[in-house]
Image (tube, rainbow, N blue to C red):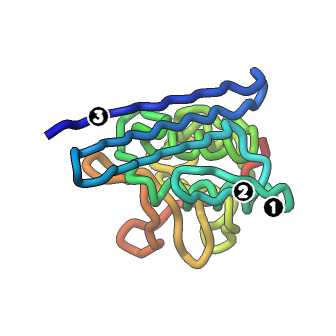
C-alpha cells in the first residue's frame, strides 16, 4: 500500500492585548486505489470573555449582551463539560483545584483576580447565607476566615466545582451531606 500524508498547519497570533490565536491542520491519507481520507481540525481560542460564551468544536464565541454573572455562569458550565481533572494548585485547562477554578473563571469572564486560596477569595466577596445565593456567587465550605473549599453557584441549587483528586470539574447539587457554609457575591 502506498500512503501519502500531507499535514497543513497554520497559526496566527493576534494583538498582544486580548488577541485571538487560530490554528488549523488537516491530514490527507491516500490509499492506492481506495480513495482519500481527509481529517480537518481547527481551534479558535480568545483569551478574554466579553460576554456569553458557547463552545462548538473547541471554538469559543462571545456575546456582549450578557451580564458579568451570566458570563461567569456560562464559562463555569462550559468548563464542566471539558473533562478538566482536579489538580492541586492547578489553574489551567489541563487541571484545576477548587480555588484555581473560581479564580480562572472570574479572570476570564470578568477580568477579576480572586487569588488562588479560598480565604483570600473570601476577601473579594460580600458574604451572605447560602439560601440567598444568586448565579455567579461563590459558595464556601468551612468557617469564615478558615474556608477549605469554594465553588461557583449556577442557580437551581447547583454549582460548578473542582471537587477532589480523581474527579473532574463538574456540576454538583447542593445537599445536606456536603452543605456550603456561606455564600458571597464577588465585589472585585
Nearer to the camera, 22 or 109 = 22
How crowded pointer 1 is (Cα within 10 Å; few <14, some 14-19, many 20+) is rated as some
Nearer to the camera, 155 or 168 = 168
**Mark 1 to mark 3: distance in Å?**
48 Å
* Relative to 51, 148 lies left or right: left
Where does label 1 land, which residue?
66
Q: Are marks 2 and 1 in contact (CB under 8 Å)?
A: yes
**Mark 3 to mark 2: distance in Å?**
45 Å
Q: Are marks 3 and 2 in contact (CB under 8 Å)?
A: no
Q: Position of residue 131 (x, y in %)?
A: 63, 74
Where does label 3 land, which residue?
4
How crowded pointer 2 is (Cα within 10 Å; few <14, some 14-19, many 20+) is rated as many
Q: Which one is in front in this view, the residue at disc 1 or the one at disc 3? A: 3
Q: Residue at image x 46%, y 65%?
A: 171
Nearer to the camera, 152 or 43 = 43
* Mark 3 secondary-structure assignment: strand
Q: Is residue 147 above or below residue 89?
A: below
Q: Position of residue 68 (x, y in %)?
A: 78, 55
Q: Specify the label residue 71 is tagged with.
A: 2
* Mark 2 secondary-structure assignment: helix
Q: Position of residue 109 (x, y in %)?
A: 70, 47
Amino acid at each position: 500500500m502506498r500512503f501519502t500524508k500531507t499535514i497543513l498547519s497554520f497559526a496566527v497570533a493576534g494583538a498582544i492585548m486580548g488577541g485571538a490565536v487560530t490554528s488549523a491542520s488537516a491530514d490527507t491519507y491516500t490509499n492506492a486505489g481506495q480513495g482519500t481520507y481527509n481529517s480537518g481540525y481547527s481551534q479558535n481560542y480568545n483569551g478574554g470573555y466579553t460576554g456569553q460564551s458557547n463552545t462548538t468544536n473547541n471554538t469559543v464565541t462571545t456575546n456582549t449582551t450578557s451580564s458579568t454573572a451570566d458570563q461567569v455562569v456560562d464559562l463555569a458550565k462550559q468548563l464542566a463539560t471539558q473533562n478538566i481533572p482536579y489538580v492541586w494548585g492547578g489553574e489551567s485547562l489541563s487541571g484545576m483545584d477548587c480555588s484555581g477554578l473560581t479564580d480562572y473563571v472570574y479572570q476570564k469572564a470578568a477580568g477579576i483576580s480572586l487569588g488562588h486560596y479560598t480565604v483570600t477569595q473570601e476577601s473579594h466577596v460580600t458574604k451572605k447565607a447560602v439560601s440567598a445565593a444568586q448565579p455567579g456567587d461563590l459558595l464556601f465550605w468551612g468557617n469564615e476566615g478558615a474556608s477549605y473549599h469554594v465553588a461557583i453557584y449556577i442557580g437551581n441549587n447547583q454549582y460548578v466545582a473542582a471537587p477532589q483528586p480523581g474527579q473532574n470539574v463538574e456540576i454538583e447539587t447542593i445537599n445536606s451531606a456536603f452543605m456550603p457554609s456561606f455564600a458571597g457575591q464577588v465585589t472585585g
